[in-house]
Image (cartoon, rainbow, N blue to C red):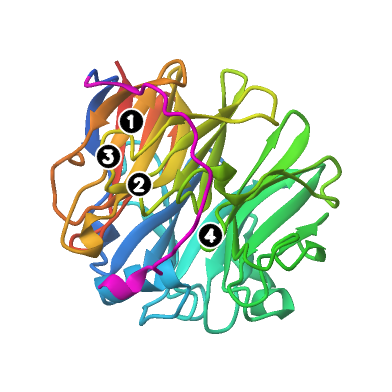
Amino acid sequence: MHRILPILSILLLAFPAFSQTITSTTTLDNIQQVSRDGFAFPTNQFVWTMTEFNGEIYAGIGNWTDSESGLSAWFNGISADSKGGQILKYRPGNPNWLRVAESGLTSATNEGVRVLLEFQGALYAATQNPTDGCEIWKSTDGTTWTTVSSGGFGNTHNLAGVAMIEFGGELYVATENRTDGAEIWKSANGTSWSQVASAGVDNLRNVSISAMIEYGSKLYVGTTNYLEGFYLYTSIDGSAFTPVLSKGNSFDGEMGILDMEEFSGGLYLSTFNIRKGCSVFRSLDGTAFTQVAKEGISDEGNTFGLSLQVFGGRIYLGTLDRSPIYSTGTFDLYSSGDGTAWSAETTEGFEGIEGEISIRSMTTLQDTLLLGTGSVESNTRVFAAEAK
C-alpha cells in the first residue's frame, strides 16, 4: 500500500525546537456513540463534515465499497467504486439519524459530501466527484435538494469542493484540482458563480485549497502542496490574494493546511506531515506564525491533523493515524486550554477499535461536542461528549 502517498524529497530550513508539553488529563465526560455503525451502511467510511442547520446536525458521508480503494481515492484524488455519498441529519435523543440524501444525490460518482454550510437560509453541499467534477447542491428544508453547480464549475478536473465559507455576504467554494491547480469560486445568491482564484492561486502545485476561515475581517485560505509544502494566503476583498506563509512555513515535510480555527484571539492551523507527524501553528496577528504542537503531538504516526474545534473553553485537535496505510491503527484526540500545553484525551480511539483511523470532523450542538470518525476496517460513527 506504499503506492498511496507520493515519496517526496524536500529541502527545508531547520527551526529551533520548542519544548512540547503533553499531559494525560482528560476534559471530556459522558462520551457516547450516537449513530449506528456506518449509519447502517457498511460501506460508509468517512463522516467528512458536520454542521448545524435549523437546530439539527447534518453530516456529509464518504462512501466506498472497498476500504483500501476508498483511502487511496482520498489520498490520490482518484475515483473508486462507490454507492454514492449521503447526507443525514440528527437531533439529540435520536441515534438512528434520518437519511435526507443518498446514492450520491443523483449519481454514485458523487463519492462523498465533503463540506456542508448554511448560507442565506439554505444548506449547501459540495461533493467529491473525480469522474464528472464536483457538484454543489442546495436545500431550503434539509430534505429536498437541487443542483446549483455541476461539472466542476466547468472544469471536471475540479474533483472536489473541499472548503466553503461565507465572506462579505457571498458564498465561497474552494476546490481540489491536481491537474490545473486549485480554484476558488463565489456566489452572491448561491446560483450564479464567478471565479476569484485559479491555478492554485499563484502556484499550480497548490492542488487543493483545503481550508478557509475569516479572521480579523480578512479571508484566509490554506493549501495542500505535496512538492513544496503548504501555502497560506489572505484577502481583504475576497478577490486579490496575498501570500502569508509559503513552503510549509519552512518546516520539514509540512504539506498541507487541513483546518483552521480561531481560539482566544489567535488563529490556529492544523497540518499534515507524513514524514514527522502533524503540527499546529498559531498566530496572534494573522501574519507571524509559531509552531505550538509538533510531530503528531505524542505520536509521529499522527500524520494528519484533520480537524480543529473550540468547545468548553478549549481547542480540540482530531488526528488521522497513518499506521493503517501499512497495517491498522486508531485516532488520537488532543485538547488545549491555552493553545500551547496539550492534553491527550485519547490515543486509542474511544473504544480501541482497530481501523477507526481518524476524527474527520467535529462540531457543537448546544452543550455537546460531536465527533465524526473515519474508518478503513470498521464503519464510520459519530460520538457525543460533554465537558467535565
Could you tell which of marks 3 and 4 lies nearer the N-terminus?
Answer: 4
Residue designated by label 3: 332
Residue designated by label 1: 334
What SS does tag 2 mark?
A: loop
How far, Cα to Cα, is label 4 from label 1? 35 Å
Q: Amino acid at mark 3?
A: Asp
Is 347 included in the stretch rendered in magenta? Answer: no
Residue designated by label 2: 276
Residue 42 is at least partly visible in this image: yes
Circles 3 and 1 in contact, beta carbons < 8 Å: yes
Circles 3 and 2 in contact, beta carbons < 8 Å: no
Residue 153 occupies quadrant = bottom right
Residue designated by label 4: 143
How far, Cα to Cα, is label 2 from label 4? 43 Å
> Callout 1: few (<14), some (14-19), or many (20+) C-alpha neighbours within 10 Å?
many
Which residue does the image show at 35% across and 23% down from the upper left?
Answer: 20
Q: Amino acid at mark 1?
A: Tyr
The residue stretch that appears in magenta: 1-24
Counting from the top left corner in percent of width and height, residue 197 is at: 78, 61
Position of residue 137 in the picture relative to residue 292 (left or right): right
Position of residue 80 in the picture relative to residue 388 (left or right): right
> Callout 4: few (<14), some (14-19), or many (20+) C-alpha neighbours within 10 Å?
some
Could you tell which of marks 3 and 2 lies nearer the N-terminus?
Answer: 2
Q: Nearer the viewer, mark 2 or mark 1?
A: 2
How far, Cα to Cα, is label 3 from label 4? 34 Å
